[in-house]
Amino acid sequence: MKEMSRRSFLKAGTAATAALALTPSELLAKAKANKKNANLGKIKLLGVGVGGRGHADINGVTYKGKGEIYDDVEFIGMCDVDQKYAKGVLDEYQKLFPNMKVYNDYKKMYAELLDQADAVICGTADHTHAIICAEALAAGKHVYCEKPLTRTVYESRLLTKLAAKAGVATQMGNQGSSGEGVNLTCEWIWNGEIGEVTRVDAFTDRPIWPQGLERPTEVHEIPSTLNWDAFIGPAPKRPYNSIYHPWNFRGWWDFGTGALGDMACHILHPVFKALDLGYPIHAEGSSTPLMSDCCPSAQVVKLTYPARPNRPKVAMPEVVVTWSDGGIIPFRPDGLPVGKNLNISGGGAIFYGTKDTLVVGCYGESPYLLSGRVPNAPKVCRRVPGGPGGHQRDWIRAIKEIREGKKDWTRTASDFSEAGPFNEMVAMGVVATRLQGLNQTLDWDGENMKFTNIPENATVRAMLKDGFSIHDGHPTFNKTYTDPVNAREFAAELIKPNYQNGYVLPDMPKD
């Protein structure tokens, strides 16, 4: 596929973003009109970012298994900035849907096909999740978005409110939320099986991609199959280097959220859900050397949540949630059998209760109590279809209920009404790490999305180059840092990013 000219890029972007000039009430009216007039035939889908994790998501809505596909969905367009990386996927799906169009820029696809589509699946790099999903929601489309939902707190809040205004079916790609483990963890805690929880330790064995790196100075030739400008999207421009794409984007601040953003959406979801968490009131972060461009090799984040309303069988007191990654593992809880590994499928969470301790793995897998008891808690009937595509097909189920006019349609397991506030928890951990130079506990006003105790003239900086060398057997330390920046201003940018290159988010809908 030929790369678009600047004129074509701008033209497509203008057409795709025209809906964003509407007020929130107009957007809601448009969304309702789209749903009312929807063709009740096959659900027409667009896929954005299909060469990586997005491949699993489009497979989840398409395949029943053993090569058989569902007859209720149809992809009318797919986009990936890297036509080489995604070639196998695109070829596969063009055989399944011969009329499907292929693009290397979502803006062009949106300009041509968004009005015809019912729903969008987003599996791009983290930094473009918000803009792609916001434009789809503004047009009244159902949205499935890979985790993390967004890079920042503000973006998560925005998608939460846009989805609520549009009244559409949404789902974040933390597939463990559709599993029995998350459900069982909630049942046990809500039934008072481990008592009141005031401490949770969680961790992952990630990253499994490079982190803690200096920004590369070498400029590589952009492959003819890669639309680098479209990959950059709303992020600051930078020369192409193969270290960024396709897999390693997660380790760079401009494009990803590191091991925390990648895995906390799987590991902390049962914590957020079972403990009825909302906004934290305090945040602290520390890490291996904090680089200017790249996420740290390892980090520890501590978030404190205030007491919440009691449940019928258990109180919800103030709780401290501590996250670690990069090889930093929590101390083994008392009573853990010798030789038993806390790591279950990539990490885990330990709930310390006043009556017992509960351990649950990544994706909510295999929860168990250290006492060895197996609680006889009440069971909640699950609606999520079985099989590898259950999480994605639950989203299709919700779309169908809305299209059929059901007023009491059932939300998905990770609907944006829950995934949005939860993802703020993850994004807050990133902010705490990047503000660690303040060496203080940060007080957070969640409602207004701001820190309340950063001194007016405080500054922070990050490392540009490590500069370590050995000369004649003697170590030399010559670290280079960024210029100090105002901490309040930097924090504001971390919470609400300044989009560049002509990309603009819609305004935050009013409550």
Image (spheres, grey):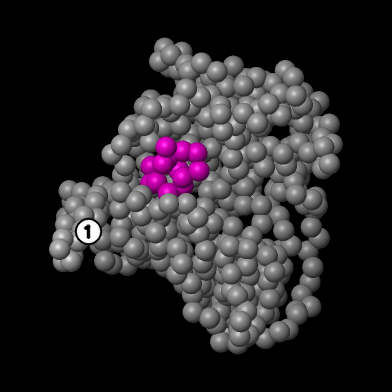
Q: Is residue 265 shown left or right of residue 299?
A: right
Residue in view at x 57 percent, y 65 percent: 347
Magenta residues? 242-254
Mark 1 packing: few (<14 Cα in 10 Å), some, or many (20+)? few
Dividing the image into 4 quarters, which one contains the N terminus? top right
User: How many callouts does the rendering have?
Assistant: 1
Vertical relation: 379 (above or below) 339: above
Vertical relation: 455 (above or below) 411: below
User: Foreground residue, 506 or 16?
Assistant: 16
Q: Is residue 287 shown left or right of residue 54?
A: left
Residue in view at x 19 percent, y 61 percent: 470
User: Foreground residue, 132 or 305?
Assistant: 132
Residue 501 falls in image quadrant = top left
Instruction: Find disc 1 in the rendering and name its residue.
Output: 468
Q: Percent from the top left, x then y, of residue 393?
A: 75, 43
Instruction: Determine the secondary structure under disc 1.
Output: loop
Residue in view at x 75 percent, y 80 percent: 374
User: Foreground residue, 504 or 417?
Assistant: 504
Vertical relation: 369 (above or below) 322: below
Residue in view at x 79 percent, y 50 percent: 387
Q: Percent from the top left, x then y, of residue 380?
A: 78, 64
Residue 392 falls in image quadrant = top right
Magenta segment includes 257: no
- Can I make out residue 413 in this image? yes
Magenta segment includes 247: yes
Q: Percent from the top left, x then y, of residue 414?
A: 64, 51
Q: Is residue 291 shown left or right of residue 234?
A: left
Q: Percent from the top left, x then y, of residue 403?
A: 76, 33
Amino acid beneath label 1: Phe
- Can I make out residue 318 in this image? no
